[in-house]
Structure formats: C-alpha cells, structure tokens
Amino acid sequence: MSLPHAILTALLEKPSSGLELTRRFDRSIGYFWSATHQQIYRELGKLEQAGHIRALPAAQPTRGQKKEYEVLPAGREELTAWVARSEDPRPARDPLLLRLRAAGVVGSAGLEAELERHLVLHRRQLEEYRAIEERDFPPDRQASEQDRLRHVVLRGGIELETFWTKWLTEALAGFRTGA
C-alpha cells in the first residue's frame, strides 16, 4: 500500500511526469522504497482514476507528449491520513538471512564470497549516504521541518548500513575462524 503514498509524496514535492518520477525514485526515494518503472506508471493510472492526481493540461497537445501530474486535494487528504495511520513494523525479509539459515542445513559452499560481496555493497551505500549527508545537511545550516525530516530518513539509512557493515564484518570473521 505504500507505493501510491511514495508517489503522492514525490508529486507534492514537485509535479512530475512518469519518466521524471522514475528518475527521482532511482535517485532518492528508491533508497528506501523501490519500484519498477512499470509499477510507477501503473500506480499513476490508479491514482488518477481514484481522483488523487491529475495530468496537468499541456500548453499544446501533442501526440506522444509526456503527461505531468499534480496531486489533487483528495490525494493530499489520503497522504495526510496515511501519515497519521498506525502501522506495525514488518519483519525483515532479506534473502541473505534466509540463505545463511539454509546453509546451516545444506552447507555453506560459496557463501563467504557472497557475504564479502554484500559487505562491499553495504559499505558503498554507507559512503554514498554519508556523502549526501555532508552535502545536503551541513551542521551549520538552519534546517526547515521538511529538511529535518528528510535528514531523519537519511540518518535511518546511515544507521541501517552501519548495522549491515558491522554485522557482515562479524559474520565473516566468524566464518573465517569457524566461530
């Protein structure tokens, strides 16, 4: 249920075409809520049908022209209600954790290399998040509420990547020593 809310959020930040939305998902929202281009376009159609968004009128109608969407009052109301709604945390669903559990049954051949690969990926993501934080949230900058909330989300990503790099480092150490 969160993809339509991610799209509403993005469109409230800036009216966009479907293509622009997919690019923004690839650059920002996709760090914590991923969606394929097809899912985004499909959801835009549903949101438009539900009366939550509308395509902005084009200055000159042209065949094949990209539609730019904006959020309607009903969409803002839906997003506001969703933000205030209570929702229980979901259990982690990570294939790597399941593969580690399965390795306890069938053996761990090839798993060490995969743990190392994941460690490299998580370290890279952590570096990227820290670079974003340094660039977008300098300590001496007066931040708006919107910026503070964006920084909280980024800090969550930094903490998750910090956890994964620490956990994977420990898992690999245990793997190598047999502990």
Image (tube, rainbow, N blue to C red):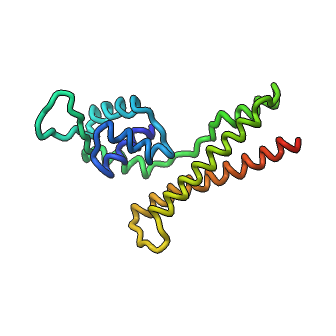
Q: Name the foreground residue: 176 vs 22.
A: 176
Q: Is residue 111 left or right of residue 91?
A: right
Q: Nearer the viewer, residue 35 or 81?
A: 35
Residue drawn at x 73%, y 36% is: 113
Q: Is residue 3 left or right of residue 71?
A: right
Judging depth in this view, the residue of 64 and 155 nearest the camera is 64
Residue farthest to the right, as pictured? 178
At which x and y percent is residue 151?
Answer: 48, 60
Quarter of the image with the N terminus in it: top left
Q: Is residue 146 left or right of residue 53?
A: right
Up the image or down, 7 lies above or below 133; here it is above
As drawn, the residue found furthest toward the top would be 106
Location of residue 154 in the rendering, given as x and y in whole percent from the top left corner: 51, 56
Identify the residue at the far left of this view.
Answer: 60
The answer to which of 142 and 82 lies nearer the viewer is 142
46 displayed left or right of 60: right
| Position in image of residue 142 (x %, y %) | 41, 72
Q: Which quadrant would the C terminus be assigned to in this image?
A: top right
Q: Identify whether 86 is placed above or below 50.
A: below
Q: What residue is shown at x 45% (from left), y 36% (from top)?
A: 35
* Residue at 80% in and 29% down: 109
Image location (x, y in percent) of residue 116: 71, 41
- Splitting the image into 4 quarters, where does residue 5 fall? top left
| Number of numbered callouts drawn | 0
